[in-house]
Amino acid sequence: MLAFTLALLYPLVGLAAPVGHWRWDGSIPGSTMSSVNVSLVLTGIALVFDIAVGTPVAWYLSRASGRDTILWEAAVLISVLMPPLALGILLSLAFGPSLAPGAWLLRMGLPTTNSPIAFVATQFYVSVGYYIVAARAAISSVPTDLERTAALLGLRPWQVFRRITFPLARLGFAAAVSLAWVRALGEFGAIVVTSYYPSGMPVQIWINLQDAGMPAVMPLLLIFLLIALPLPWAIHLLAQRRGSDAVA
Amino acid sequence: MPLLEAHIVKTRRSFRLDVELRLKPGERLALFGASGAGKSTILSCLAGIETPDAGQIRLGDMILYPPSLPLHQRPIAYLTQNDWLFPHLTVGANVTFGLRGHETNGAGPWLEELKDRLGLGPLWNERAREISGGQARKVALARMLARRPPLVLLDEPFTALDHPTIHDLVDAIVKWHAELGFTLIAVDHRNQILERLCPRAAAIEDGRMVQEGTWPELEDAPATPKLASLLAQ
């Protein structure tokens, strides 16, 4: 186990690789802090959409028994399995000005490429499938008999979800949120097509690599890791603590 | 005027259930019969866990079926051999789970009685996942009765309990029936328990009610050889 863990963490040694002096100054092209802000704010918004849209879908998929469920599951899996670059190209075409939805959005003042909306929409597309798959597993872990019992005690469906399903599936939901966060924050292949600007951290890292080499990449890479990893850990730990404290 | 009028038709793999029930307010009826006769299916349809294929179910002024009334709108208590306590909540939170704010206000003395009679006081702040099976059954009973429902359905809730606990629970249910006046339908494979719980019984065989009456009436003139055999056990 130790050997496996060491092997798993070994890539982090790359942070100490001799790539020359890290360029912390403002001389690198683009704006490092701006990309951090873009990533944090817009990924946060995408995550809100993931949760708002994905939770009811996950609940439906875990509780529905009809044959049509197979179709909905397949649709969700397509979004998970789609190669990011292909998804980015398809999104830019499907919501481009040559097709009605994109043209309409453009007329409404909502540009679907190189805009915050494009950024959030792309992140939503790449991450919501992961959220749904994980949230569905979390909900499925709660026995339906517990939900039925709560309903027989007079609780409406949304109250059953709030008081029974969610508290019991809390750790699974934490995993779903973490997965969606990491997936959306780290997305590069689709984002670079649909939203080169405003540049999030992955795109900015790529720009830095192209224009100034590894010394300009390393500071942003470190910031990227510090931002991407602690939130999932924090959510997981919080869910674990609250899960064990939820007694009233 | 009956409290419960039900005609339940439900096709299962091995039989077709077709049973009519009429119970007055406060009446207690045992459903008696061999395993797989359809007794639990009747309770499940009344509670709303299963939906009948045809028929109708009326409880007081409420039509439970058709269309099937959502579970949360049915003023029915349903206790099975599985307690289904909410493991993340305390015993106290489980017992008061179904009480809304305004119901909790006047329920103090009643909750105290439930707590004292079932010996739940020392467990009140324990987590439900940490108590024993017998204690859990008592908590489930208290949770079910806390709302003071007009119809109580018991589907073999005494399974896997020791005799003193069964004795205690049956006594408690009979006492609270006298106080609260709920209508009770009970299913169990042991007629000794049913006889203590309910003065009347309906014998169910292969999805049909073959006889209904008091226990002495059933024992004196059982309608079928199978019923006679079951009563003799």
Image (cartoon, coloured by chain):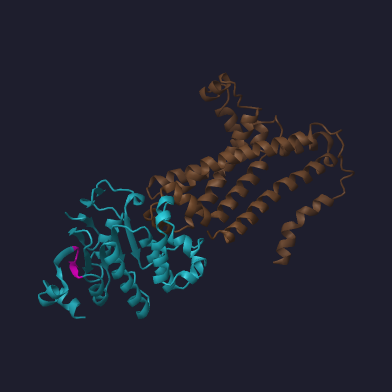
In the depicted structure, whether residue B147 falls above or below residue A124: below
In the depicted structure, whether residue B103 falls above or below residue B164: above
Q: Residue visible at 81% across and 50% down?
A: A15
Q: Position of residue A45 (x, y in %)?
A: 62, 37
Q: Position of residue B59 (x, y in %)?
A: 24, 52
Q: Residue visible at 84% across and 51% down?
A: A16
Chain in brown colour: A
Q: Residue visible at 53% across and 21% down?
A: A104
Q: Position of residue B49 (x, y in %)?
A: 33, 56
Chain in cyan colour: B
Q: Quadrant of the N terminus of chain A?
A: bottom right
Q: Is residue A155 left or right of residue B38?
A: right
Judging depth in this view, the residue of B179 and B82 nearest the camera is B179
Judging depth in this view, the residue of A154 and B19 nearest the camera is A154
Give the residues in magenta.
B199-207
Is residue A88 visible in the rendered image? The answer is: yes
Is residue A203 visible in the rendered image? The answer is: no
